[in-house]
Amino acid sequence: MEVVIAPTGEVGRLGADAVTQLLAGRPAAVLGLATGSSPLSTYAELIRRHRAEGLSFAQVTAFTLDEYVGLAADHPQRYRNVIATEFTDHVDLDPAAVHGPDGLAEDLVAACAAYEAALTAAGGVDLQILGIGADGHIAFNEPGSSLASRTRIKTLTPQTRIDNARFFGGDVEAVPVHCLTQGIGTIMAARHLVLLATGRGKAEAIHQLVEGPVSAMWPASVLQFHPHVSVIVDEAAASRLQLGAYYRDTWANKPVWQGF
Ligand code: F6R
């Protein structure tokens, strides 16, 4: 696991560097896209590079991590719509190549199985962008989630519904109770995981992810078992790391040819 500690304003650029590096060698890459606030600066930088430098997503296939159950197709907080608004509509990514779990399916179990099948048919995810919850969740895999789980229906914790109420006009009751989410096992199957976090509110989760014991109580800690993880954090999110000086030194001395 590589830990990169950077100024807050650099986190998005570094996330975009990882994607740009992948696309340079593999224009038809499969990208895994997170919603939430953490990847927004990375998406903004990728959009800038698309416009200013011709970075192309024309051959890319994309898969989102999760989706609320029951939100209307045109609801602005439906994650399929959020990712379009925040990112994919602003680059040359074919809308038909952006996939998400179907939270409106009549048969949600079948929809989860179909999503797993689509991921497999696409050859798996080359690079998965991740955020992390203050409680260590990744996608909607809350504490206690099976570390081997696959895409399935989950019940959101009251805290996550409170946290996400800011996207629903502050109305907690408007936040769906259920979601479909890639499982932790699904996420672990991606070939490169790029986790982005900023702010002191993420500091304990980042410490547990990088340095804690692997435990379902901090679902992201399972990433310690993944062979290729880049954790890109700002100083505040890094503030509880015990080996911060070592991570800084390693990054400062990283051979340029190595990339992400
Ligand atoms: C969103 C997702 C969530 C968020 C996490 C952090 O698709 O998978 O796990 O990454 O809740 O959210 P932000 O980035 O808003 O702090």
Image (tube, grey):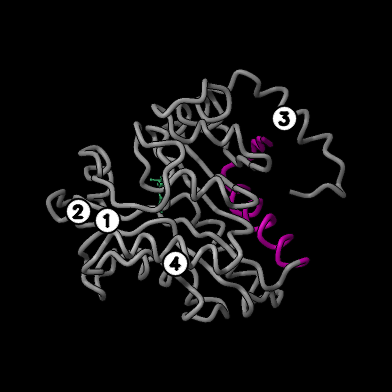
Residue under numbered circle 2:
175
Mark 4, secondary structure of its residue: helix
**Precedes in sequence: disc 1 or disc 3:** 1
Residue under numbered circle 3:
248
User: Of the numbered discs in the image, which one, if any, rests on residue 167?
Assistant: 1
Coordinates of residue 131 in the picture (x, y in percent): 47, 46
Tell which of 131 and 190 is nearer to you. Answer: 190
The image shows residue 129, relative to residue 22, as above or below, that is above
**Precedes in sequence: disc 2 or disc 4:** 4
Coordinates of residue 160 in the picture (x, y in percent): 27, 42
Query: What predominant SS class does the magenta segment belong to?
Result: helix
Dot 1 amino acid type: Phe
Q: Marks 1/3: CA distance?
A: 35 Å
Q: Are marks 1 and 3 in contact (CB under 8 Å)?
A: no
For label 4, the crowd category at 10 Å Cα-Cα, with few meaning under 14, some 14 to 19 and many 20 or more, is some
The magenta segment is 1-25
Dot 3 amino acid type: Arg
**Precedes in sequence: disc 4 or disc 3:** 4
Residue under numbered circle 4:
86
